[in-house]
Amino acid sequence: MTNMTEQLIKITQQVNDFENKYHREPASVQLLIVSKNQPIEKIAKAFEAGQHAFGESYLQEALPKVAALPAIEWHFIGPLQSNKTRKIAEHFSWVHSVDSEKIATRLNEQRPPHLPPLNVCIQVNVSEEATKSGLKISEIASLANICMQLPHLRLRGLMTIPRPSHDFAKQREEFHKLLVLWQALRKQYFSLDTLSMGMSNDFEAAIAEGSTLVRIGHAFWEE
Ligand SMILES: *Cc1c(COP(=O)(O)O)cnc(C)c1O
């Protein structure tokens, strides 16, 4: 077995263990491996080991990787600027960080018509920190409504990056806020199926609070 296969088995096992521990359905949490700062050769090995979805945060870094490994399902998870939307709409399957009408509209207009709709999540700032990207809680409903009208976008759910904390109870508290918002939104839009929350240091708390997609970087790559 290659190293990469072992690492993939290890992280998948952890996700499965947390599903069991918190009475989640088996396989209800999807694994997104975050490949920023990782070279193409290592990503290719992880793909060969069976991982199909990878996330990138910086467009310039991501484009050569996407070109080299087109069979991967690529997710854009980083900060969005207007001048980056075209390439993102052309080269990614998912965008987790939509946080304004302007960005949503541009992604919709720039999505090539021969591709399936771009899967998007609205990024929410649950900690309501001034410095962090993401929408205020009060702004979610209106952006969700806009995304639902855009034919080349498919709104899948909500995403958050909470204020980092080593306290498990505090981590759960922040993720619980996003869970409540997501459940409320799903009463209106039944098709929403994605709660993108949890990274290397807090994915247990995220799974406990209903995450359906964890974004794991260093816990996967570091041996
Ligand atoms: C880098 C990054 C991750 C992965 O972080 P780790 O702590 O390495 O697991 C997840 N989500 C986003 C948005 C990131 O930028």
Image (spheres, helix red, strand yellow):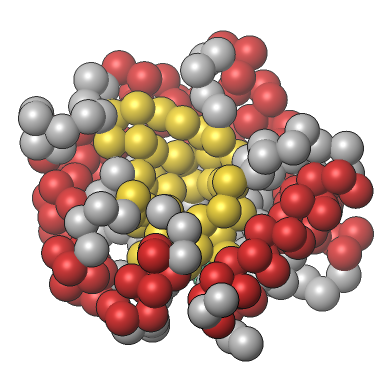
Q: Residue furthest front?
A: 1
**Image location of residue 90, percent across then percent down:** 14, 47
Q: Is residue 148 left or right of residue 216?
A: left
**Image location of residue 61, percent across then percent down:** 24, 76
Can residue 108 be seen in this snapshot? yes
Q: Quadrant of the N terminus?
A: bottom right
Residue in view at x 63 percent, y 13 percent: 187
Q: Is residue 157 above or below residue 63?
A: above
Q: Is residue 7 above or below residue 152?
A: below
Q: Is residue 201 above or below residue 143?
A: below
**Image location of residue 73, percent across then percent down:** 33, 50
Q: Is residue 192 left or right of residue 171?
A: left
108, 62: nearer the viewer? 62
**Image location of residue 78, percent across then percent down:** 38, 63
Residue 118 picture quarter: top left
Q: Is residue 153 left or right of residue 55?
A: left
Q: Is residue 60 left or right of residue 173?
A: left
Q: Is residue 68 above or below residue 98?
A: below
178, 88: nearer the viewer? 88
Residue in view at x 63 percent, y 31 percent: 182
Residue in view at x 41 percent, y 29 percent: 155
